[in-house]
Image (cartoon, grey):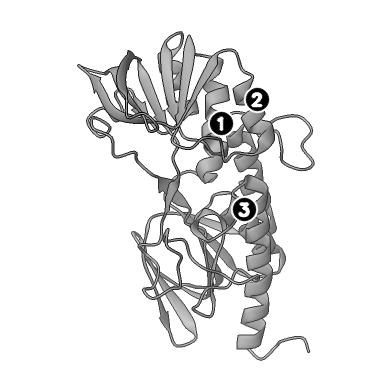
Amino acid sequence: METYDLVILGAGAAGLGAAQYGARANLKTLVIEEMAPGGQALLIDRLENYPGLPEPVDGYTWSETMRAQAAEFGAEFMSSSVTAVRKEGDSFVVETGDGAVGAKAVIAATGAKHRHLGARGEEEFAGRGVSYCATCDGPFFRGKRMVVVGGGDAACDEAMFLSKLAERVIMVHRKDRFRAQKTLAARVLTNPKIEVRFETVVEEIKGGKSVEAVTFKELGTGRTYEEKTSAVFVFVGSIPQTAALPAGLAKDDSGSIVTDDRMGTSLPGLFAVGDVRVTPFRQVVTAVSDGAVAAHCAASYIDELEGKAYL
């Protein structure tokens, strides 16, 4: 079994940030990712608020630049799934689909998966008009009527993207206002192609071979009504991906991992970054920052473990 100083689980923004700082700290660093490097950043059409990039860049280009930079510093990448992580003494064993690797410290950058609505018809029409990725599936419904569900940054960002393609976007949110950043929310509310309906939910998605209509419910009045649409895009939060991590980690009510300001979890030597941890703000820039902090603190942890701490 090959052993590394630092093993990073996931190559999203947080994992790529950790890879750069881990490798630059002269740690033998391995990043394990079952999909393409970039994670949810790959879905960004225009990354316009990343510091130092005055011109917007697409998520793929940004992700590939980050991966190449980490590799240049010496980080290694493995394309595989992680099935389990366990601590044995002072070290970790990371089980993957291609065998086990050892690690002195582990950074979990496993991210989160899209949460579903639970509306009738949602699962039936998934991939046939129900989508969780506007940039992936929006072009298939060009010139048609679309529905966006959600009220956070992702929902507003994706609604803006879809407004460039759709005949009209109907955006519904169960609350009486958006929770998104004020700048994003203002753009949506002033976009003539987006109609926002607050205190409204999707009760049922209907159709034949694909989505044809949606039944809405007004929470204040209880009134239900049906409207035609060709697609429903869902952005109502996410589920932290922690199944492969050791049991007993401290988590909040949503299942996100609780960390300290060093990104350390309740298990010494295991750090958590990005969307998998409890954080008040989920952005590419904060995910990268998480990764940098975790890698720096993992290096200090390893030094202490080996009796090399700088006093």
SS state under label 2 = helix
Above or below for 300 versus 148: below
Query: Tag 2 or tag 3, which sits nearer the N-term?
Result: 2
Mark 2 belongs to which amino acid?
Arg
Q: Residue at x 46, y 17 (%)?
A: 139
Tag 1 residue: 156
Give the foreground label among 3 and 1. Answer: 1
Residues at marks 3 and 2 touching, judged by CB atoms closer than 8 Å: no
Quadrant of the image containing the C terminus: bottom right
Compare residues 296 and 265 and report the one nearer the observer: 265
Badge 3: few (under 14), some or many (20 or more) residues near its Cα, within 10 Å?
many
Residues at marks 2 and 1 touching, judged by CB atoms closer than 8 Å: yes
Tag 2 residue: 187
**In this view of the protein, can residue 272 be seen by the observer?**
yes
SS state under label 1 = helix
Compare residues 192 and 7 and report the one nearer the observer: 192
Q: Residue at x 42, y 10 (%)?
A: 144
Residue 248 picture location, percent across and down: 39, 76
Badge 1: few (under 14), some or many (20 or more) residues near its Cα, within 10 Å?
many
| Disc 3 from disc 1: Cα separation | 20 Å
Above or below for 42 versus 104: above
Residue 93 picture location, percent across and down: 41, 75
Q: Residue furthest front?
A: 221
Query: Tag 1 or tag 3, which sits nearer the N-term?
Result: 1
Tag 3 residue: 287
Q: Going by the image, does 25 lie left or right of 35?
A: right
Number of labels in the image equals 3
Residue 64 picture location, percent across and down: 61, 41
